[in-house]
Image: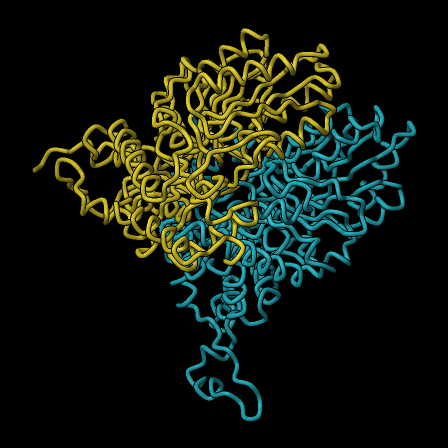
Chain colours: A yellow, B cyan
Amino acid sequence: MEHEDPRNGESTHPCSKKPKIYSKFISEPEIRDEFSHHQPRVARINNGSFGSCPGSVLEAQRQWQLQFLRQPDAFYFNTLRNGITASRKIIKDLINADHVDEVSLVDNVTTAAAIVLQQIGHSFAEGKFQKNDTVLMLYCAFQAVKKSIQAYVTRAGGSVIEVRLPFPVNSEEEIISEFKKSIEKGKSNGRKIRLAIIDHITSMPSVVIPVKELVGICRAEGIEQVFVDAAHAIGSVKIDVKEVGADFYVSNLHKWFFCPPSVAFLYCKKSNVSSDVHHPVVSHEYGNGLPIESAWIGTRDYSSQLVVPAVLEFVNRFEGGIDWIMKRNHDEVVKMGKMLAESWGTNPGSPPKMCAAMMMVGLPSRLCLNSEEDAVRLRSHLRDCYEVEVPIFYQVLKDGEEGVRDKDGFIAGYARISHQVYNTLEDYEKFRDAINRLVEDGKTCKML
Amino acid sequence: MASSLHSQTHTNTMNGTSASAADPQSHISKKPRLHSPPQPLLITPSDILSEFSHHDPSIARINNGSFGCCPSSVLSAQQQLQLQWLQQPDDFYFNQLQSRILQSRNIIKDMINADHVDEVSIVDNATTAAAIVLQQIPWGFAEGRFHPGDAAVMLHCAYGAVKKSVEAYVTRAGGYVLEVPLPFPVNSLDEIVKDFRKALERGKQKGRRVRLAVIDHVTSMPSVVIPVKELVRICREEGVDQVFVDAAHGIGCVDVDMKQIGADFYTSNLHKWFFCPPSVAFLYCRRSTNNSDLHHPVVSHEYGNGLAIESAWIGTRDYSAQLVVPKVLEFINRFEGGIDGIKKRNHEAIVEMGEMLVKAWGTHLGCPPEMCSSMVMVGLASCLGISSDQDALKLRTYLRDKFGVEVPIYYRAPKDGEVGPVTGYARISYQVYNKVDDYYKFRDAINQLVHNAFTCASLPN
């Protein structure tokens, strides 16, 4: 066929070796092939931590890297900026932002958090905020974000409120009501809440948070800035940043959106604050707006930021594109979660509508998982002896809290299972059988 | 014009092989000597061609200084590491990443004569290192340790990105910034030392306290090797709190000995002159300095565990460029004299090329040979009419697009009273992949432009 199939690539791409001709939609063998670089024997049910990248996108990335190495000066002057802008435009459309100026590309959510929090830190230092003005975050916020708050807020004299959400959780209403209560408590003593950081999908334990409602509550309570940490969101849940209504919204593209490590977008709604947000690695473009600053932070490999068009191509090889992928991942992870919980006699950590492509599944109490160390031990044991890669969460019970029981005792451990397009039923059966084996053998975590 | 470069022996020297290897009767020298360990096989000119075969062959790439270069054997090693991560990232994260970063840090520690590996952090580039060092300043003001009017000192020709960083972190926090102008063209080290001391004394006149001095080891544009050891000593004498040496071009280009130089902080890119892929740099922080407050601005789980540990995990990313340092050392040691041999031959070659060009064009070098490293500034004919930074950039683009020559151009504004000065200088670099022809191509391009009465004014905006 002579005519150009638009799925074979745009003119901004460096020449690939031969034009790819695809059959109508991607087939099962083709998916297997795309992820054939994954270690074959491992039941890789932890897409949530480090994501995944198909072979065709890795190849596109290599082409970009080669182009830079071939003639870096020409690449820097003529190619790089346009390539980044093309990626930003795609993301702007995916997340329903108003303007591409609102979309910056950074390495990861950790970097985005530093960007937003540095600005808060400046406000304390420059007297815009008073000592003891407050930042609000979830108790289960990602550890790196908590440290960032320590580094930029606490150090500058700000105080922190942690909102403890219930887990296991049964409904969105539980989350909303707990959140409201915490804000009220936080505002007692006349403290002003300057920033709220809300996860869209919490990491450990993983639950989909009703962010739109929580942002609404924040506005109603007069909280000036809201930052949504949506590390897991893009490719996992539908994103509409205008609907969500936050000032800052960030998500990693290498987790659920098939980009190579690493790239994230940071959406900054246009406001008085957004012009004062800077990349901490200051370079020539300082003062030209965050997207432009972030597009050059010194000589580096920017190739993972340039492959977003190639990722879109990949995703559109699936009938129904990313929407279909999201739905499929959700349906499968729920199914697998139920299968595991039934086999072990335990419970899921949240109802299906509060999961995306990850689910928390209770582990049998007979494993006696009673500490963080136990969770780490179990995870390593599963990796080393059963070739199962899955993160384990230890649930610390609040004073007076009873916790969920199975037939043998209290459930304090949960596994966070993920489903991505490369996963198969065998992955979860392998995990099911591993746990059942440990229980049958009378193993507890301390023995591992 | 007969150039010694035409002689095979000299060519071999420039390309880093032993002179005898090209000799047809050299098979005798290749046999291992009895009673001594066999010499590792030295890299050959055709090996080098192959290692850099991914470079665009149509370009005279005489700008190693800007973006560096990376041999394909190192790129392959990097790809292997990237693949290992992609195969099973959790396993790599828990079992490999930290020990491999530590291995790279240990190699760097030895190369730079640091006391302890704790003093060596690996970051993306010198730009990041500058942000790390400078971020201490606003905290100093916020926490009352510094007072309004306290100053930072930097060279007037400090790298643009570093100047912006100083603006973002010092000026914004209320600090005063003192810029030290250095002469260019420059004739001797003494000129630099004298001007620096004068500027520092003047800056301190109002009883100002100088909290930080930022000194380039090898300036970028215009490129000159600065006598950093002397300048660091002057800073100590003048009571400057902390000295930060920006040696973006340091390792692989000049001698990098932390204890000799004596700075509190020293950073250098490894992807410029040390054959690493983009991008990786080290930031050295002397242990005796009170610098426990240094943090990576991208805060992650390891916050508070020391800069080196913080920098080794700043969220999910591709750390492979930081992990190939052992492989790079292997590559370097295939050259006679290792990195020292490479530095020496690069320097000799660039001086020779620079002198060839200024002779051909009737201009001059920007500094004496002993003040250049593997880069040198070469005066461009004033009839080209370079009269602004934009002209310099436009000429650079023109040379790339029309002549296939990649070389950065520097505009030097004329001083009062100067008659017919040279206002444009090209910064030529020499790295192991360069050939004489690269510089002939540049020579001929400029000669042609001059012959055609070309001026920058004729270039479109």
Decide if residue B103 is on the left or right side of residue A236: right
Residue sitting nearer the eye, B195 or A383: A383
- Picture quarter containing residue A288? top right
Relative to residue B55, is residue A325 depicted above or below?
above
- Picture quarter containing residue B311? top right
Residue sitting nearer the eye, A81 or A415: A415
Decide if residue A156 is on the left or right side of residue B248: right
Residue sitting nearer the eye, B223 or A156: A156
The mark total stands at: 0
The percent coordinates of residue A442 (x first, y second) are 44, 56
- Picture quarter containing residue A371? top right
Relative to residue B110, is residue B181 depicted above or below?
above
The percent coordinates of residue B1 (x first, y second) are 50, 61
The percent coordinates of residue B287 (x first, y second) are 77, 52
- Residue B447 seen from this side: no
Instruction: Name the residue at the bottom extreme.
Output: B34
- Residue A441 seen from this side: yes
Decide if residue B316 is on the left or right side of residue A188: left
Q: Residue at x 68, y 40 (%)?
A: B295
- Quadrant assignment for the N terminus of chain A: top left
Instruction: Name the residue at the front extreme.
Output: A407
Q: Residue at x 46, y 54 (%)?
A: B92
The percent coordinates of residue A210 (x first, y second) are 43, 19
